[in-house]
């Protein structure tokens, strides 16, 4: 699946859809990457978060984030608003350090009879195939299957990642191998399951997911899953 995805990014794609650079970054992430360098999981007021996209971007600049994605549930509206803010920021301060913003979304799906969340990155939010998943609520029927969600993200030019794989009623040791068979590109290894302050990835779960990702050729991604007022924690 990694070979499949690396050809998707071409020089004429918008920066927010540059999956080639994103793949390179995913290969370089460590437990220290998040939350002060990269953060690929957060929510705005366009789903169940408390921050407006503009406030997310302001925090990203203040923190000195190098790269991020707003992954609202079944919506790209937060990303679009953040991208407008970022475009204005670059125009007004062309020489200022600027975080890299990618498209993102979090989609509910059925995997092995368990409802899981699949993150999409670097996809084209205007592509017709992804539109059913950007209407503000989870889909029904065949489109709810993990295979269809992964295939739709790929068809829209993006990367698909299993969010917080140790949070579901089926174990990560079962879900990750099956997701890999379906063509998923990665799973979220660096994730905190108990909202500590300061934020740190949960050691036991991180080690388990890293091992499974390595065994199945998947990227290990990171994110705070922010729903509150600080990008440095899950809830605040």
Image (cartoon, rainbow, N blue to C red):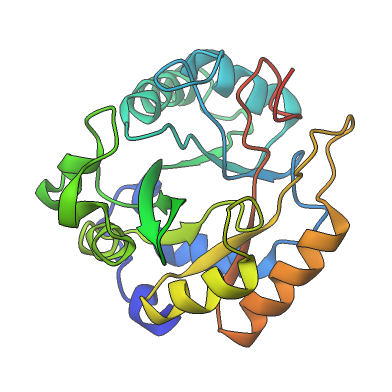
Q: Nearer the viewer, residue 80 or 226?
A: 226
Q: Quadrant of residue 67?
A: top right
Q: Residue furthest left?
A: 128
Horizontal side of 125 relative to 158 (left or right) equals: left
Q: Nearer the viewer, residue 77 or 134?
A: 134
Residue 25 visible in the current orientation: no
In the rendering, at what x and y percent does residue 154 appear?
Answer: 28, 64
In the rendering, at what x and y percent does residue 215 appear?
Answer: 64, 86
Q: Nearer the viewer, residue 142 or 134?
A: 142
In the rendering, at what x and y percent does residue 85 appear?
Answer: 43, 19
Residue at image x 36%, y 52%? 109
In the rendering, at what x and y percent does residue 110 appear?
Answer: 36, 56
Residue at image x 62%, y 76%? 213
Q: Nearer the viewer, residue 89 or 40?
A: 40
Instruction: Indicate whether 178 appears above or below 141.
Output: below
| The C terminus - image quarter | top right
| The N terminus - image quarter | bottom left
How many callouts does the rendering have? 0
Residue 209 visible in the current orientation: yes
Horizontal side of 150 relative to 155 (left or right) equals: right
Q: Quadrant of residue 156?
A: bottom left
Residue at image x 38%, y 45%? 108
Instruction: Indicate whether 199 appears above or below 118.
Output: above
């Amino acid at each position: 699946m990694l070979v499949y995805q690396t050809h998707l990014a071409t020089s004429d794609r918008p920066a927010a859809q540059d999956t080639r650079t994103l793949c390179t970054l995913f290969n370089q992430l460590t437990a220290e990457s998040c939350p002060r360098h990269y953060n690929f999981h957060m929510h705005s007021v366009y789903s169940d978060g408390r921050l407006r996209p503009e406030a997310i971007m302001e925090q990203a600049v203040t923190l000195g984030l190098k790269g991020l994605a707003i992954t609202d549930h079944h919506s790209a509206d937060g990303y679009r608003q953040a991208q407008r803010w970022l475009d204005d920021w670059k125009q007004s301060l062309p020489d200022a350090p600027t975080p890299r913003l990618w498209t993102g979304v979090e989609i509910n799906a059925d995997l092995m009879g368990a409802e899981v969340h699949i993150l999409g990155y670097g996809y084209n939010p205007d592509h017709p195939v992804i539109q059913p998943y950007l209407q503000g609520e989870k889909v029904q029927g065949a489109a709810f299957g993990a295979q269809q969600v992964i295939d739709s993200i790929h068809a829209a030019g993006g990367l698909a990642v299993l969010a917080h794989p140790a949070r579901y009623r089926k174990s990560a040791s079962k879900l990750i191998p099956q997701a890999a068979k379906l063509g998923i590109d990665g799973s979220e290894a660096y994730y905190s399951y108990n909202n500590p302050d300061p934020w740190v990835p949960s050691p036991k779960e991180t080690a388990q997911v890293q091992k499974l990702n390595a065994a199945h050729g998947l990227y290990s991604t990171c994110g705070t899953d922010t729903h509150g007022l600080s990008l440095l924690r899950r809830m605040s």
